[in-house]
Amino acid sequence: MTNAEWIKIRRDLHQIPELGFQELKTQQYLLDYIETLPQEHITITKWKTGIFVFVKGTVGEKTVAYRADIDGLPITEETGLDFVSQHEGRMHACGHDLHMTIALGSLTQIVQERIEQNALFVFQPAEEGPGGAQPMLASEEMKQYDIDYIFALHVDPKRPVGTVASKEGLLFANTSELFIDFHGKGGHAAYPHETKDMMMAASAFNVQLQQVVGRMVNPLEDAVVTLGKMEAGTVQNIIPEHARVEGTIRTTAAKTMPEIKQSIERILRGIEVRYECQTSVDYGANYYMVHNDGEYVERFKDALSDTNIEFIEAEEAMTGEDFGYMLRDLRGFMFWLGVDSEHGLHNSKLNPKEDAIEVGIEAVVSMMKS
């Protein structure tokens, strides 16, 4: 197929973003395309809203797996493109439409040319939440495959088209969502002594939270704790009985994550005593760090030596990716693919350059053939 045909597929997928485990239209679109390929050496298996596509190799002694995530985000698109999302309040704002297209392109080439080893294409739902990698990895459908190694890519708006980036060891951080509710007693603003003010409780928690990384985490271990949302109150003259804060925790060491959570819970116990309230905490989706196997990163570099793709040594990022669960149990790696967008990931105006699709296909197929 031509690059123009891959661009059309990407644009089709871009218009139907769906949230985690709701990717029914997306799954059907992928299946409709996959079923147009020669089926002689293909086995297709569905798992929830995801898909496994196994391609038997000419020798078939080993199996190399490639994973592409398929879900979108709860973001209203503001790109102004002709192929803007048709699903209100939903957008492929993290490049998963490109991820899927590159996987389809790589699958097509592997089916047409066939390689010595078996190839498994994993179309994974719910990467953005609640997390599809861990349950998919534990599924009987995936356990039937004896995978030698697995790899994946993620678009990188900051890098130019024609480049990829990766590194041995830690690439992405451990991450956890953070949701905390404060419950007290509301009342009239003129009688604060008769209330238990949850605006004050949540604000005090926010101030104390800033001490967690600075004073409770080993300074040699990187960590970030950020509150990005706070809600309390209804009008200006009523003291709120409920407040809610939402945030994120990110660490470069796996052991640091539970230490931070313990610190947060100690602070909340103090808040409960000081403000005579009750609190509840929910850590939402938790993702394990993406830790690359150096052997396969080196093999990837070698595989690209016969291409015009430039390999760049990546730096660690506090980004989260549930592909880390797969790399915890299987050997492999992840790499960045340059897509040169003015706006970044999870931005309502993200607009990756579509020439990166062919680059991604070439990089994936080159690795599978190596």
Image (tube, helix red, strand yellow):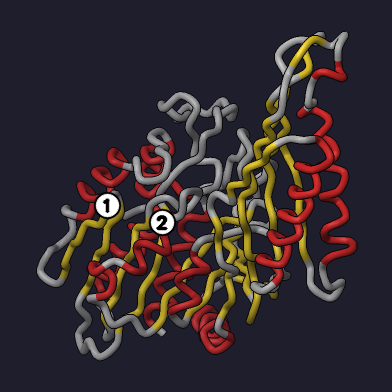
- Name the image quarter holding residue 115: bottom left
Instruction: Find numbered disc 2 in the image and state the secondary structure of the residue it sits on.
Output: loop
Residue 30 appears left or right of 98: left
Q: Nearer the viewer, residue 204 or 369?
A: 204
Q: Quadrant of the N terminus?
A: bottom left
Circles 1 and 2 in contact, beta carbons < 8 Å: yes
Residue 245 visible: yes
Q: Amino acid at mark 1?
A: Lys
Q: Nearer the viewer, residue 32 or 128?
A: 128
Task: Give the image location of residue 261, x and y in percent.
Answer: 69, 59
Residue position for label 1? 48
Residue 283 appears left or right of 141: right
Q: Residues within 10 Å of mark 1 (few under 14, many from 20)?
A: some
Q: Amino acid at mark 2?
A: Gly
**Which label's residue is closer to the chain start, 1 or 2?**
1
Q: Residue at x 71, y 54 (%)?
A: 265
Task: Give the image location of residue 335, x and y in percent.
Answer: 56, 69
Q: CA distance from mark 1 to mark 2?
A: 10 Å
Disc number at residue 132?
2
Q: Residue at x 19, y 77 (%)?
A: 56
Task: Give the image location of residue 195, x and y in percent.
Answer: 79, 21
Q: Residues within 10 Å of mark 2 (few under 14, many from 20)?
A: many
